[in-house]
Image (cartoon, rainbow, N blue to C red):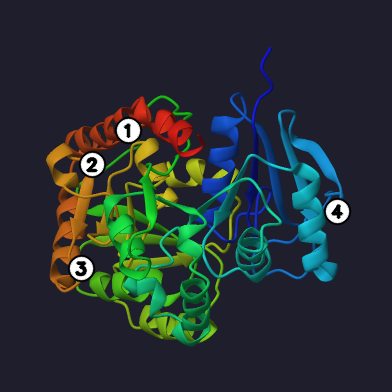
Amino acid sequence: MNKKPKLLILVDWFAPGYKAGGPIQSSVNLAIALKNDFEVFVLTADTDHGETLPYPGIVPNKWTNDFDSQISVYYARKATLSAGQIKREMLAVNADFVYLNHMWSPMFVVYPLWLKYVGVIKGKVIVCPRGALYDSALSVKLYKKKPFLLVFKLLQISKKVTFHATNDREKTAILKYFPGARVLTADNLPKTLQKEWVPISKESGSVKCIFIARIVPIKNIYYLLDALSRVKCKVELSIVGPIEDQNYWNSCLQLISQLPANIQVKYKGSIENALLADIVNTHHIFALPTTGENFGHSIFEALLVGRPVLISDQTPWLNLPDDKAGWDLPLNAPEKFTAVIEEVCAWDQAAFDEWSHSAWNYARKFISKPSLKTDYLELFS
């Protein structure tokens, strides 16, 4: 029997972490999807995004199969993580394919790229920016990112690696900064386990909305709150996600305090991924007026359980009204977000059931695409 090729995934955060959002879910889904075709290894840190304490029950600095019997994970102790440790473990695996997530991580992207540049790493290196090269992402802390871009260009890293774009928009962004780079496109891998469609009660005149994202300006919760301030019907909004920008959240709290009595907002804090589907199920729509998403796992997972999504047009999920799966609206027209919420408020049970089931079907069709996996087999070949 032919020996399976080795795939090494490097990522700052991995399960059981959840506070970094999409990058964790993307890496988990990738590892699970390819574990039957590759020997999969994951090199990561033992501490969640924004935390100082390691994951409970995790054995650090040792390869284990506790996450999955077919996936080996090395949780490096964050407090003592060193370049030498990264190099040692990468050489120990001796992977045929090395997959790097995002662009700016010193230990899990920049240093491995240096090892490839100087010839220490022999395997094929694939870099997935995960939206890091979008204008909306680069505008945040650009002073920290510009030096990395300059070094990448000076070293001509693009000639040493293959870029993975998860959509055509990301491919354009990659080629803007790395002209002539080899770029392969493969849709982000979502969760593929879909439960049966389960509707909830819907009465005309009220609506329950949920927002799930990190509390940072790019996710745009303030924009959603402002849109709600002009809604006349009864709205309950649940906000789920870690507060990463306290000043931004303080401005949101001030706006929340000024909302009319018909708008009720509850902040539910951070919730681990495994529990999110059940929480989304208790709401009628998912709302995220983001300024930019590479994929938007929370968006797709709302569709997966059959909840229409109210999002901006800065994600891959476009033309949603055509399938009655939701709305993708321009951010320069906040009145349209207000109008949609008013529209959903007016829905009776039959209208909600129609859109809810359509959203569920939209997700079902997406996860049924044969190209979801075959594109990755081409990427790692």
Which residue is at the front of the view, 136 or 307? 136
> Mark 2 packing: few (<14 Cα in 10 Å), some, or many (20+)?
many
**Disc 3 designates what residue?**
231
Q: Residue at x 61, y 63 (%)?
A: 117
Residue 2 position (above or below residue 202): above
Residue contact at pointers 2 and 3, CB within 8 angstroms: no
Residue 370 position (above or below residue 54): above
- Image quadrant holding the N terminus, namely top right
Provide residue 221's location: percent of width, then percent of height: 37, 71
Q: CA distance from mark 2 to mark 1?
A: 12 Å
Which disc, if any, is residue 60?
Answer: 4
- Mark 2 vs mark 1: which is more N-terminal? 2
- Mark 4 vs mark 1: which is more N-terminal? 4
Evaluate whether residue 193 shows in this view.
Answer: yes
Q: Residue at x 55, y 70 (%)?
A: 104
Q: CA distance from mark 2 to mark 3?
A: 22 Å
Residue 193 position (above or below residue 315): above
> Mark 1 packing: few (<14 Cα in 10 Å), some, or many (20+)?
some
The nearer-to-camera label among 4 and 2 is: 4
Q: CA distance from mark 4 to mark 1?
A: 37 Å
**Disc 1 designates what residue?**
366
Provide residue 138's location: percent of width, then percent of height: 40, 76
